[in-house]
Amino acid sequence: MSSQYYIDQTPAAVKDAKGLHLITQSTPNGQKVQILLEELKDIYGIQWTTSLINIFTNEQKKEWFLRLDPNGRIPVIVDNTQSPPFPVMETSAELLYLLKFADKDDVFGFKDELERNQCLQWLLFWHGSGSPYQGNFNHFNKFTKEKIPYAIERFHNETLRVYGVLEIQLSGKYTGEPREYLAGSGKGKYSVADIGTWPWVKGWASSGFTEEEMSPFPHLLQWIKRIADRPAVQRGIGDAYNADKQPDLLIKGE
């Protein structure tokens, strides 16, 4: 056990884990890493262990968690094959870490440097310009006690705007060639750019957007369904990461 990252209060399931260990909750951010791990399992047979937490109990704000991720956000990967164990925070960094160390053939990345950069562009676009808008729309529209019309309208409109950016890319509006995926030559290739974006966008209805509001984005809707049909994606958002279905994986704080 490394005293730098693990303390007496660190749950045994975390500090005694071997190999890759994922600490998550099946939110859109958690699902990004869950999906990639499931995809890598299908290709390479990689193994990992999982701990689930309930972010509404603020377990992620306790010292044991903050030693792994000072920002106190899920998910976190801890790679116990490194010495000392190597924690990885921030979903895009986690996806890129898994690409580097678990996807030797770049099945979900790219070997060509320009395609790799394009993948990084779209991964970071959603990380910095997509999920903050949709997350804040969810927050102000669904969870705040006091409704603030300006905030709701702003994040509602900005989320639709970034959906429109994705539609431009997928529709080939300026290239004349529709795409199936966000990055890669031709019609593109399924990659971490898609994995890092899909878990948020697929939740448009639960966020509060209507079918009429989504009608300007037909290529985006097709993209959502295309990715949803992948078996690893279904597992990555499924019962294996549901605390009600997997109570033994749930870390219960004192």
Image (cartoon, rainbow, N blue to C red):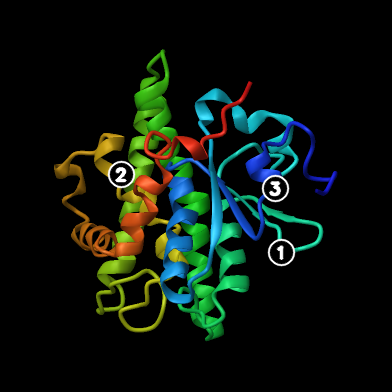
Q: Is residue 133 above or below residue 84?
A: above
Q: Position of residue 18 (x, y in %)?
A: 66, 57
Q: CA distance from mark 1 to mark 2?
A: 35 Å
Q: Nearer the viewer, residue 27 or 157?
A: 27
**Which tag, 3 or 2, sits closer to the chain's start?**
3
Q: Which residue is mark 2?
A: 203
Please tell me whether residue 36 is drawn above or below residue 160 in the rendered image: below
Q: Quadrant of residue 65?
A: top right
Of label 1 and label 2, which has the lower sequence position? 1
Residue furthest right in the image:
3
Pointer 1 local density, CA inside 10 Å: few below 14, some 14–19, many at least 20? few
User: Which residue appears farthest toward the bottom when viewing the image?
Assistant: 112
Q: Please state which amino acid type lies under the numbered disc 1.
A: Thr
Please tell me whether residue 206 is drawn above or below residue 101 in the rendered image: above
Please name the amino acid that badge 3 sits on.
Answer: Asp
Residue at 40% from the left image edge and 19% from the top image edge: 148
Give the structural element (helix, strand or loop) at label 1. loop
Which residue, given by chain and number where applicable, does mark 3 sit on? 16
Please tell me whether mark 1 or mark 2 is closer to you in this view.
Answer: 1
Residue type beneath disc 2: Gly
Q: Secondary structure at mark 2?
A: loop
For numbered disc 3, what is the local secondary structure? loop
Could you tell me residue 99's position as x and y percent? 56, 70
Residue 80, percent from left and from top: 71, 58
Q: Is residue 242 left or right of residue 73?
A: left
Question: In the depicted view, which residue is nearer to us: 96 or 167?
Answer: 96
On screen, residue 17 versus residue 156, left or right, reads right
- Label of residue 81 in the image: 1
Q: Position of residue 114 (x, y in %)?
A: 52, 82
